[in-house]
Amino acid sequence: MQETVYVDLGDRSYDVVIGPDLLAEAGTRIAPLLRRPRLAVVSDEQVAALHLDGLRAGLATAGIEMVSLDLPAGEATKSWPHFERTVEWLLAEKVERNDVVVALGGGVIGDLVGFAAAVLRRGVRFVQIPTSLLAQVDSSVGGKTGINAPQGKNLIGAFHQPSLVLADTSVLQTLTPRDFIAGYGEVVKYGLLGDAVFFDWLEQNGPALSAGDMAARVRAVTRSVQMKADIVARDETEQGDRALLNLGHTFCHALEAATGYSDRLLHGEGVAIGCALAFELSSRLGLCSQEDPSRVRAHLKAMGMKTDLADIPGDLPGAEALLDLMGQDKKVIDGQLRFILARGIGQAFVTSEVPADAVRSVLEDALATC
Ligand code: GLY
């Protein structure tokens, strides 16, 4: 049941291996990258408690020893203090230029460790072992690394591609249902942005996938990673097409800021709501049919996902304040907001030509239901 997706980036190309029980194979998978049989592994305390022993055993089968650092779990770890601690630990462990660093965890660990690897000794190689669905289908692939600044999320970072990604779909069984389904928001995004057949398949198979069907999970992660790999290969540093991966994110980032990046709204939940709003906006602008936003919302609801602004607990600011928060998004270019809109399911495109009035009216109507 294993699949491999090749991310084709010239001399920075790499494999993303997807399937169950990959931790047990980590040693044989990583060994070809190593000059000496030693790895520095950075994880978070929650993931380490669940999976570090499995990784250690998997590495030992190939005679690889590991040292490890466990950081606190949570978004606050993606910050200068933990970045400094990580880099200093890697230096204290005498990680050399030709060594490999491993990121074992979700998006926070992958982004922080990737950035540490990007700057350590002017760049060492790293392997991503993503343990959340969101990290498996999105953040572990494509080389965006970084930390948050007080001024906003992901404002400090570098493009640094991993040398290998091992997406072990067995570890998804240890996620809470809420975390799993939040990651599913990013899976749906791929169908919506570029593959209507995949969206049809998700409508049919989403419930089985959510219930734990391993074959369905491998297929969904593989198709998502394949789509991301194709886009990243065309546009590694987001000069054009890569922005398609941000479908739903302009709304999502405003909602995350409005909820204080708290657990009132997980990133994947914001992406799902943002996709529903992006389709609503597209339909009002006459770009796609009125049925499309209804179909998007129906699938999200059928999966038990947050779909509407009313699903976010607590108060939200008004439409004008949310528009202001969108204006602070780092996707603003020359003062123009960039939106990802759609001409139908699977037909997204990037545009800067969205009248603010149309966005305001979508937000006002969405807030009216709260
Ligand atoms: N998560 C969006 C990207 O990697 O471009």
Image: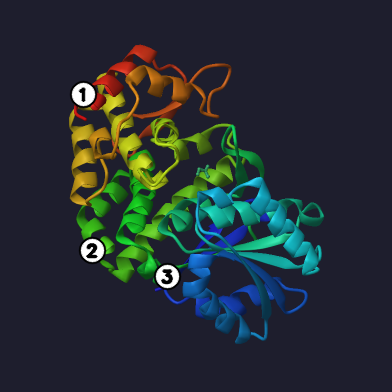
Q: Position of residue 363 (x, y in %)?
A: 30, 23
Marking on residue 368: 1
Q: In the image, what residue type sits under mark 1? A: Ala
Q: Where 78 falls versus 259 (above or below)?
A: below
Kindly state the secondary structure of the residue where label 2 is placed: helix
Q: Nearer the viewer, mark 2 or mark 1?
A: 1
Confirm whether residue 231 shows in the render: yes
Q: Is residue 140 left or right of residue 345?
A: right
Mark 2 or mark 1: whose residue is earlier in sequence: 2
Q: In the image, what residue type sits under mark 3? A: Val
Q: In the picture, residue 297 is in which quadrant?
A: top left
Confirm whether residue 115 shows in the render: no
Pick the residue in front: 12 or 115.
115
Mark 3 or mark 1: whose residue is earlier in sequence: 3
Q: Nearer the viewer, mark 3 or mark 1?
A: 1
Q: Position of residue 270 (x, y in %)?
A: 37, 40
Residue where numbered disc 3 is placed: 171
- Does the numbered disc 3 mark a residue whose Cβ is under 8 Å from ligand 1? no
Q: Is residue 198 left or right of residue 250?
A: left
Q: Residue at x 44, y 72 (%)?
A: 2
Tag 2: Cα neighbours inside 10 Å, few (<14), some, or many (≥20)?
A: some
Pick the residue in front: 307 or 311.
311
Q: How many marks?
A: 3
Marking on residue 208: 2
Q: Residue at x 56, y 42 (%)?
A: 234
Task: Quarter of the image for the N terminus: give it.
Answer: bottom left
- Does the numbered disc 2 mark a residue whose Cβ is under 8 Å from ligand 1? no
CB contact under 8 Å: marks 2 and 1: no
Mark 2 or mark 3: whose residue is earlier in sequence: 3
